[in-house]
Image (spheres, rainbow, N blue to C red):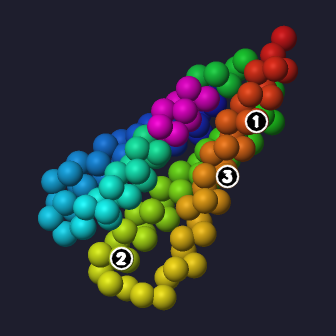
Amino acid sequence: MYKPALLSGTILAMLAVIFGAFGAHYLKTIFTPDLLTSFETGVRYQFYHAIALLILGLYASQVEAKFIKTIFIFFLGGIILFSGSIYLLCAFKSASIIGLSGLGILTPLGGICFILAWAIWVVSIFKLK
């Protein structure tokens, strides 16, 4: 087992449930439908990858530690960059804060982190004995 992945996955899954409930019950009253859809996308990807972290934490004993740590870093970075930037962009857009368009580049960087994590996981599976 890889405790950092298990702990991060558990906390991030719990936060995804909280954010999802917050969006469904409160943010729908202040966000436009488009912003709410974007926010829900952030929550969904956070939840998917929190579950992936939990699986990774349980899978850790099967592969080399370097793969586990690298996958963990990319998943965690992806959640922070992808979902985190979506949350911030939605909050800033709903508050009409301007001048933050550069923040939008973080979302695709987070997506690239997710892709890299999954690709490295595939490589680690091929290396299984």
- Under circle 2, the secondary element is helix
Disc 3 marks which residue? 112
**52 magenta-colored:** yes
**In the rendered image, the vertical position of residue 110 relative to residue 93, given as above or below:** above
Let me know if residue 4 appears in the view: yes
Query: Residue sitting at 54 percent across and 71 percent down?
Result: 104
Query: Residue sitting at 45 percent across and 62 percent down?
Result: 86
Residue 68 percent coordinates (x, y): 72, 34
Q: Quadrant of the N terminus?
A: top right
Marks 2/1: CA–CA distance: 35 Å
Asked if residue 79 lies left or right of residue 98, the reply is right
**Marks 1 and 3: CB-CB under 8 Å?**
no
Please report whichever mark, 3 or 2, sits nearer to the chain's N-terminal start. Answer: 2
Marks 1/3: CA–CA distance: 12 Å
User: Tag 1: residue type?
Assistant: Ile
Asked if residue 41 lies left or right of residue 109, the reply is left
- The image's mark for residue 93 is 2
Asked if residue 80 lies left or right of residue 124, the reply is left
Q: Out of 58 and 107, give the one closest to the viewer.
A: 107
**37 magenta-colored:** no
- Under circle 3, the secondary element is helix
Residue 116 percent coordinates (x, y): 72, 44
User: Which region is colored magenta?
Assistant: 48-57
Please report whichever mark, 1 or 3, sits nearer to the chain's N-terminal start. Answer: 3
Q: What residue occupies the far front of the structure in this picture?
A: 34
What is the tally of numbered marks visible in this picture?
A: 3
**In the rendered image, the vertical position of residue 12 relative to residue 60, given as above or below:** below
Marks 3/2: CA–CA distance: 24 Å
Q: Quadrant of the C terminus?
A: top right
Query: Residue sitting at 31 percent across and 63 percent down?
Result: 34
- The image's mark for residue 120 is 1
Point out the frontmost of discs 2 and 1. Answer: 2
